[in-house]
Image: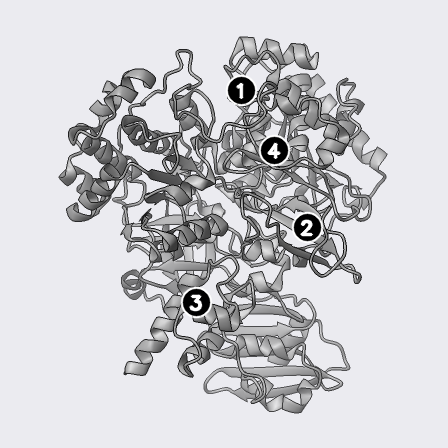
Amino acid sequence: MNAMTDGGASVRTTCPYCGVGCGVEARVQPDGSVKVVGDRSHPANFGRLCSKGSALGETLSLDDRLLHPEIGGARVSWAAALDSVAAAFSGAIAGHGPDSVAIYAAGQLLTEDYYVANKLMKGFIGSGNMDTNSRLCMASTVAGQKRAFGADVVPGTYEDLEQADVVVLVGSNLAWCHPVLFQRIEAARRKRPMTLVVVDPRATATSESADLHLAIAPDADVALFLGLLRWLDAGGFADRAWLAAHVGDARAALAAAASFDLDATARATDLSREAVAHFFDLFARNERVVTVFSQGVNQSVSGVDKVDAIINCHLLTGRIGRPGMGPFSVTGQPNAMGGREVGGLANMLAAHMDIEDARARDRVARFWNAPNVARRPGLKAVDLFDAVHDGRIRALWIISTNPVVSMPDADRVREAIARCPFVVVQDVSASTDTARLAHVLLPAAAWGEKDGVVTNSERRISRQRAFLAPPGEARPDWKIICDVARRMGFDGFDFDGPAAIFREHARLSAFENDGSRAFDIGAHADVSDAGYADLAPFRWPRRRDATTADRRLFGQGGFFTFDGRARMVATPYVAPRRADGRFTLNTGRIRDQWHTMTRSGKAARLMAHYAEPFCEIHPDDASRLGVAPAGLVELSNARGAVVLRALVTPRQRAGSVFAPMHWSDGFAGNARVDALVAPACDPLSGQPASKQSRCDVAPFRAAWHGFAVSAVRPDPREASYWALAPAEGGWRVELAGTADPDDWQAFAGRLFGGSDDLEWLAYRDAGKGIVRLAAFRGGQLVAALFVAREPVAVARAALIGELRRVGAGSLRGAVLAGRPGVDRPDPGALVCACFNVGVNEIRAAVADGRAASVEAVGELLKAGTNCGSCRVEIRKVIGEAGALETV
């Protein structure tokens, strides 16, 4: 391995966050910490990292790690735990059949882990009941691509995003969710003319950079692309020669679009006629167009039709598989695609083979020597947890995911798991919302401790490599699964390491594959252990007889249908019903957080950007409902209720609200947003519609609001509302209550777990409802609580900084006043998580003339020079500062 520039051996591995699949270099420091930087040689990112990737070294603590197997909350040996799992699964199968057991896993697993889990469930147990949380993000793309191309294949490459003349982002906040890809686009835009179009109901960091933002009505994407298809066909932009050579009958698809002229499209999408025409003209007159789509397309009851409506426009014009053009799905998880390659979804077999194809079942059965291969698809995620709830699933194995937070109708999912006779949770964290319900806990190795491969959004397979020893008794996922399989009496699981699993996976991909199956990595079927250790990133397919991978697919046709032709699929538009007077709830991600925060929630600087759960609401809606800016708001429906901080902003479309899905019960009192999401799914893909649920919105009436900092983890559960986050030097917590406690100092003592040696300083104004308490020990600030009738206005970042300051007791007055000392300027709310730059630092640089542009701010403060996802925010701060100067 190469050494980093400041000395010491480094390990090249792959980031465990989104589907961009960035290469990183990690090196263990002499003090045991880990330094992580971007791998400049990796073709996905060329050294760039986003804020989350940059903070990976800060997420590797053993806080909350599951270190030993447990049964019923008591530590046991590995033998006892594995015996328990094997006996429970074998007993359920013997008494109730193979479909009485299930595995629910995650796109966080490595391909080798996925492979053996799928082999166990579908090959030897004989049930299709293995599904994953990739069902929640990518299943509609899988189904749509299979309908159009005959296989689950992304045709293009990341280079296409840089070579396009028009990039269309549909349902994708790429600047926040895939920042490195967005910065590749932005860098290309700075070098040559390129038009960026964003199709999204919300205004986002991505749309702020767009040349055209189409603030489409929620769930109206099919209508927009039907209108585009009609426009292209009527305007003479169809490639008739391409259609004749490579595409099946297009008449049904065109007929579905026949009524969508400009006016009909504008009405259905709630866009102006002029905006629609501008978009259509951009797409029509620029051959090099890439259409990038993500969760805003997939997470819908019409997700598959949305995917195919987009693909249809590229097939009609022949704009696919050539440089700078094509439909492009970007995946949400680091190995969502790798999981699909090995059959990680309930309707798939390994190596991209279909479970309903008798020839494929026979092929897999012979290859695995497994006569009991599942004969029909298993239960998809929502249906699977319904089966857990009603007792059809008797034994459930949850691996590396937290469905009590991430599944739709999450309270019912929690109830289902609590009802299940046997639940085993295999994870890194000991106390996720799901782990608390387990009968057996199995400690898994984490990122940095295990070896395997992952596949990114452009079909590129990269190695994850270990650079840390697993702590305690943690083991790799593949080994745990194989140990259980052998205890259940199954052969074929005697692998001596991930390299052996990868070889078998590669051999199966090539087995009886004459080119009719897209996924083929047979060139690596005989890779040695040393070759596997040094495996360089490569893009599939890579067949035995090919020395290099195909860079793009379908440029010359060659689709994976029986006749080699693509299919243009009819996608009729059904307008969603919204006449109930309630709000459309849109859920999603934010810049610095990941899934349910079990990893990213450990990094203080990642928590600083948004330290509490929030709800974006339009100013007109907020005014009508009496929701105050920075006040609290309750979202509710028949499934549940959550309380969030109100972020009143015109970015949000009127009539809709946006709330992130990250917060779990470990970080907030009542913010599991997916509890409100309806379990409605696309009928073809089974993917839940996580962006179109209906809810009521009302102000949450709090008698008091509070903010606290503490050197030790506080216990805020006594408050009606709370949101907890790690901070540099300690913790921060937002609080609110519906009634005042009898004694504020006693409340603070319970909050901070106070001891008798604390020295308290207090200020009270009963008339205004103000309470301020600070606790010191030996001149050092230990904790502080600020209470008011309205949301507390104090210098939060500065107060957090006082926890680390030796001798803070000498500035007790400043602490109690909620402002920093004169020698410690308040950095303000975090803007750049990569370099810990606050808004006040940027404002000061602009005000005194040191920086007047985003580039100048970057040169001075480094903000915006790494992942670039904060550049839009920096630009806004500069604009606001300039406006103030002119007043």
**Which element is circle 1 on?**
loop
- Disc 1 marks which residue? 377
User: Relative to 439, is 701 on the left or the right?
Assistant: left
| Residue 685 picture location, percent across and down | 44, 28
Whichever of labels 4 and 2 marks the residue nearer the N terminus, that label is 4
- Disc 4 marks which residue? 104
Alpha carbon distance from label 4 to label 2: 18 Å
Q: Amino acid at mark 3?
A: Glu
Q: Nearer the viewer, mark 1 or mark 3?
A: 3
Alpha carbon distance from label 2 to label 1: 32 Å
Whichever of labels 1 and 3 marks the residue nearer the N terminus, that label is 1
| Residue 308 picture location, percent across and down | 35, 29
Disc 1 crowd rating (10 Å Cα; few below 14, some 14-19, many 20+) is some
Disc 4 crowd rating (10 Å Cα; few below 14, some 14-19, many 20+) is many
- Disc 3 marks which residue? 855
Whichever of labels 2 and 1 marks the residue nearer the N terminus, that label is 1
Disc 3 crowd rating (10 Å Cα; few below 14, some 14-19, many 20+) is some
State the image quarter where residue 125 is shown: top right
Residue 431: which disc?
Answer: 2
Specify whether residue 188 is in view.
yes
**Which element is circle 4 on?**
strand
Alpha carbon distance from label 1 to label 4: 14 Å
Q: Amino acid at mark 2?
A: Ser
Say if 549 sits above or below 57 in the image: above
User: Relative to 437, is 143 on the left or the right?
Assistant: left
Please report the residue visible at 40 percent of the width from the left and 31 percent of the height from the top: 682
